Amino acid sequence: MSEISFINSFEMNVLWTDWLVYILLGFITIFVLYARKHEHLRAPWRQILTRRLAMSACIVLLAFASIGILDSVHFHKAEGVKVDGSVRYSSEVTSLFEQLVLPLKSNVEKTYSAPFATQLYAKENVELPDGSVTRDYPRLKFGGAHLDNPSEQKAADVTQRSFIAIIQAILFMMLIILLLAAWLARSQHSDIKTVIGTMWRGETQLPWKSMLATLFVVIVFVSLVMQLGTVYHIFGTDKVGQDVLYLSLKSIRTGLVIGTLTTLIMLPFAILLGIMAGYFRGWVDDLIQYIYTTLSSVPDILLIAAGVLLIQVFIENNPDLFPTLQHRADAKLVFLCLILGITSWTGLCRLLRGESLKLREADYIQAAQAFGVPNLKIILRHIMPNTMHIVLIVVVLGFSGLVLAEAVLSYVGVGVDPSMISWGNMINGARLEMAREPIVWWSLVAAFIFMFMLVLAANLFADAVRDAFDPRLRSQ
Amino acid sequence: MLAYITRRLLYAIPILIGVNLITFALFFVVNTPDNIARLQLGVKNVTPEAIEKWKVNHGYDKPLLYNDKQEGLETVTDTIFYKKSIRLFVFDFGVSDEGRDISHDIYTRMWPSLAIAIPGLIVGLLVNIALSMLLAFFRATYIDLVGVITGVVLLSISIMFYIILGQFVMSKLWHLVPISGYTEGIDGIKFLIMPVLIGVLAGIGSGTRWYRTIFLEEINRDYVRTARAKGLSELRVLFRHTLHNAMIPILTGVVVIIPSLFLGSLLTESFFGIPGLGSYTIDAIHAQDFSVVRAMVFLGSVLYIVGLILTDISYTLVDPRIRLN
């Protein structure tokens, strides 16, 4: 006899992209641990840590990343107990993030509604209390449903709730500052008051003031969503009545997956082939150069289109491999990353080839060869660590381009699966709504704002990484 | 020089064969000739006989890569790959699966693409150089800082946003230009203004940023210091000395994209309803017209390779220190 307790109230369901996200997180952890022990890696990172703009961008990126990671923990929820005593699980796959913002997900209206609206966008037949039927804008099921007389109460209600949200954020922020100051004071053997004083005057080595200011903005946003998002649709609703804010937040994972997994998938090939071409020279070099010149001379968009058509046919022919719609969309996403990776690895490969050509002439490598160290060991011990800064710069700089490319690809019709929530699909859907009267602008604006914030933060952070790791820029 | 160019052109042949094999493999893994025939014939008249007839008429009735029914050289030549792809090397694109002459289509659709791409390139180049020189002149001041941050902001905005906002503001609110469309001749200008402007605006962020680093690199060189030591004004140093030398990396960077201007921009053309080669390609992808896609891939690769060769040549022309061998 089993009951539903916390332990069996869910059944994990790990999608392919989830695995890849976990692997990526593992790699990042290993890299951080490795970098901590090596001074030549720590120095550039210390330089990044002192840059105000980069660290503010880092806070924003972390906020995006934590939503993406929470959204990558998928499971089936328990629905009830079967006759034989085992737990019955829902067939629907949900994620930790979806459970956290459940009100946003479940407050589904009939169709479009404007931001903070209390009435639907389109007129409908409404039954009046006396039984007669008239055409009017019906009240929303969730947006402002707690108000008796929206036209009079809404402004006051929104102001009051925003005020509460800001107070909450300030209180929470004060708690964070106190905890942080206490922790810093302990490690620096001084008292909390001095620590807060130096932070306020911006005299700390880490730009705490800018970081905390950014964090405050993030917290204000979260608490506004908590206060207002549950009773209003802050960014309105889309054609089928889904909350646009919820869609924008869900799109974060898609954007991050495309931006990061694409490079994760392409990296091994680019590193291996690039270094081999530069190190071995001769026919290996010719062959690898031939491969990447050929691949890069096929127009990217055609390669992507062909690849996406390919996976579509494969999924249609093997329906057993993909039990749910979500598994299909996920497989398509992995494949899209793969094909985007194929189109984008050639640049990195070329750079690594050039660098290894230069490195193989270096004295210490000549010495290693003279001692009879095997080639594989030379590559792993001497060449690869010395090309890592190039890899890091290319990966970080490429991220924002990939996030932006997703939107364009979805428009051309070769992007992520139409059932997957992504900024590209939101823009693509909203583009046609611009012709409506009155114009439906909110889903377009919401998608652009979120995408812009992610890409801007990524660009600012990438600039700092490049400045810190590029030896040419460092020497200036 | 001539020997170098000849060698590079010969080296292009295996690359183009490789490109053809890739496109061929990708499209025929996805689409069997039967599927293509079914798609082209429509739902109504699909009978096995009709499919066979269509395949014979369009040359899809042969084996894909290797014909074991023939003997000798014919085993390779009497195949779909050979019949359809090898003729591309003499720029004989054949007919599309819909039965239209591809070469003629490419010829007529090339002009609208160029009509947008060339003004866009020139205006963009002028604007970006002017802005980056301004930033280089005011380097390490607040003007420079504001300019650089604006650049990052501009390049973080999706190109879709520029296009949609541009269409909305210029056509719907202000009624300045038509929202999309194209005509030939002088009337066509009103259709071209917006795509060109939006293309330039969308490119300012990345262009200015790139050129600014080029200018700053030049400004730190010895010859600039010498020029200043001679007592030349900063403006004169910038225009007479730095600009000339900075044009080397800028122009060679531009040369590589000139050939691909023919292909136009997929996004701009399909948003603004311009009948250029970019929208031609998108339509072909949607219709899964293998003949057109293959022709466009081939053309794209040829232009890419031509671009690389032109870049090498332009290096020797503007920088006498570089010799090709």
Image: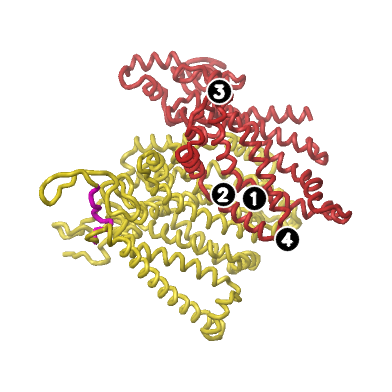
Q: Assign the magenta stretch its main secondary structure.
A: loop
Label 1 sits on what residue type?
A: Arg
Residue named by callout 1: B209
Q: Residues in magenta?
A: A137-146
Q: Could you say which disc has been placed on residue A475 in the image?
A: 4
Q: Are marks 3 and 4 in contact (CB under 8 Å)?
A: no
Structural distance between the alpha carbons of marks 1 and 4: 20 Å
If you read the primary sequence from the N terminus, does the residue marked by circle 1 or circle 3 appear first? 3
Kindly indicate whether the residues beneath marks 1 and 2 are on one polypeptide chain: yes
The correct choice, above or below, for A429 with respect to A87 in the image is above
Q: Secondary structure at mark 3?
A: loop
Q: CA distance from mark 1 to mark 3?
A: 36 Å
Q: Is B134 or A191 nearer to us in this picture? A: B134
Name the residue carrying label 3: B184
Q: What residue would you read off at disc 2?
A: B155
Image depth: mark 2 or mark 4 in front: 2
